[in-house]
Amino acid sequence: MPEKSKGAKKIVLAYSGGLDTSIIIPWLKEHYAGASVIAVCVNVGQQDDFAKMKDKAKASGAAKFILVDAREEFATDYLFPMLRAGAVYEGKYLLGTSIARPLQAKHQALIALKEKADAVAHGCTGKGNDQVRFELTYRAIAPGLTVIAPWRVWEIRSREEAIEYAEKHGIPLGNISKKNIYSRDENMWHLSHEGAELEDPWNRPEERMFKLSVSPKQAPDKETEIVIDFEQSTPVALNGKKTKPVELIAALNTLGGANGIGRSDIVETRTVGMKAHGVYETPAGTILYTALRELEMLCLDADTLHLKSQLAVNYAELVYRGKWFTPAREALEAFMKNAAAYVTGGVRLVLYKGNIIVAGRRSPYSLYSEDLASFGASSYDHGDATGFIKLFGLQVEAAALARKKKK
C-alpha cells in the first residue's frame, strides 16, 4: 500500500453499487483505520434503483451516500459534442463508457474538495481503461488529492474472489453470482458486456445477454421511418417535434432497440496495451452517428469534411484515453464547433431488422446543386474540364517524363 495513503481519514469513493465498489467500502475501512467513506454515484442514465443503492452503500459501511443527477449535463456537454466530432474509436466503438468517466470523476473530485477529503478511490482494475480516465480527471480537477485504487494493491485477483469476499462480509450481491458474471456498464448512451464466455473472442454472444435490443430476426417485419433534425450538428427534433437531449436519446434507444439496431461486437486495444473483447448495445448513438454523417456530406465542403474525418480519430483517442480535460481536446472542440456552423437540416432514416437505410436528407445550407450534378442539360460547361485536367495532371506528367528520360 502506498505510504502517502496510510493517513487518509476521509475517502470519497466512486460508487456504482456493483460488486467491485461494494466490497471496496469494507476493505477501505479495514485498511485505513478510522477512515469514513463517502460513496458518490453520478447518474448518467443507468437504470438503477438509487434508493436501494443508498441502502446497500450504508449497509456496506459508507458514512454517507451522495447522488448527483448529471443526465442533462451528460447529454448536452459530453455526448452531443462527441457526436458532433464524429468520434469512433478504432472504427467501431462509440465510446459509451469512455465518455461517461470524465463526468463522473469530475463530480467525485468536486465533492472530495467540498467535503475536505484526504483521498478519492475507485473500483477500476489495473488492467482496464477506466483507471486512467478517472485518475487523469482527478489530476485535472483536484490535483494533489491522494488516489486509492484497491484493485492495484489488494490480494483479490478475480471476480470470483471478489464474490467470495462479499459473501464473507455480508454484502448483498443481488443478481450477481458465479454463474451470472458478466461485467456490465450502462448509461443513457449504451450498455456494455464483458467477461464470461466473451473472454474467448471466438465465441458468439448468447442472445440472453442482450438487454437494450432485440435480435434482428425478432424485429418487426415492417419498416420504421424517422426524421431527425439537427442545428449546427446538434440533434434537436425527432419526427418534427422539438425534443430535449435526454428524451431524444431515450426515444431513439427505444426505436432502435425494437428494430435490432446498435449491436457491436468489438476487439479493442486498451490504453494499457492489451486487446479486450466486448459487446456493446448503442441504439441511439448508432442512429445519430449515421444521420449526422449524411447531413455533413450534404453541407460540408470537401476539405472540411476530410479534415474533420481525420481529426475525429484524434478526438476519439483522447476520449478513450481519458484526456477530456486537456488543451488538446479543447482545441479539437473549437475546430469541430466551427466546422458545424452550417450543418443544419434533417435526415430521413428507415430502421429495419438491424439496418439503417438512408431515405433522404435536406438542408438550407446544402452544397448539392441539382443543376450541376444533373446528367441532363445544365449550366456546367464540359469543356472547362480540359484545362483543369491539364493543370491538375501537370505534376503526374512531369514525373513520368523525368523517369522516362532517366531510363
Image (tube, grey):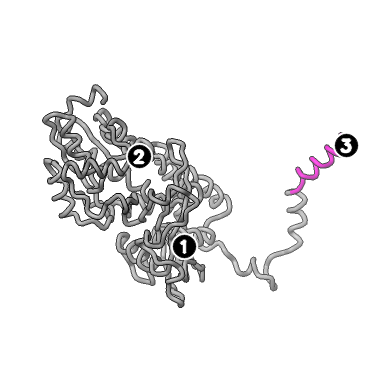
Quadrant in the rendering for residue 150? top left
In depth, the one of 62 and 120 nearer the eye is 62
Q: Is 405 included in the stretch rendered in magenta?
A: yes
Q: Which mark is residue 133?
A: 2
What amino acid is labelled 2 in the image? Answer: Arg
- Residue located at (18% from left, 49% from top): 172
What amino acid is labelled 1 in the image? Answer: Ala
Query: Which element is circle 2 on?
Result: helix
- Residue located at (46% from left, 36% from top): 273
**Residue highlighted by disc 1:** 291
User: Could you tell me which quadrant the C terminus lies in?
Assistant: top right
Give how far apart the Cα atoms at labels 1 and 2 are. Answer: 29 Å
Query: Which element is circle 1 on?
Result: helix
Examine the rendered structure and indicate whether residue 154 appears above or below residue 231: above
In depth, the one of 379 and 142 nearer the eye is 142
Query: Which element is circle 3 on?
Result: helix
**Residue highlighted by disc 3:** 405
Q: Is residue 241 left or right of 3 when viewed as pictured? A: right
Considering only order in the chain, which callout, 2 or 1, is on the residue closer to the N terminus? 2
- Residue located at (57% from left, 50% from top): 303
Considering only order in the chain, which callout, 3 or 2, is on the residue closer to the N terminus? 2
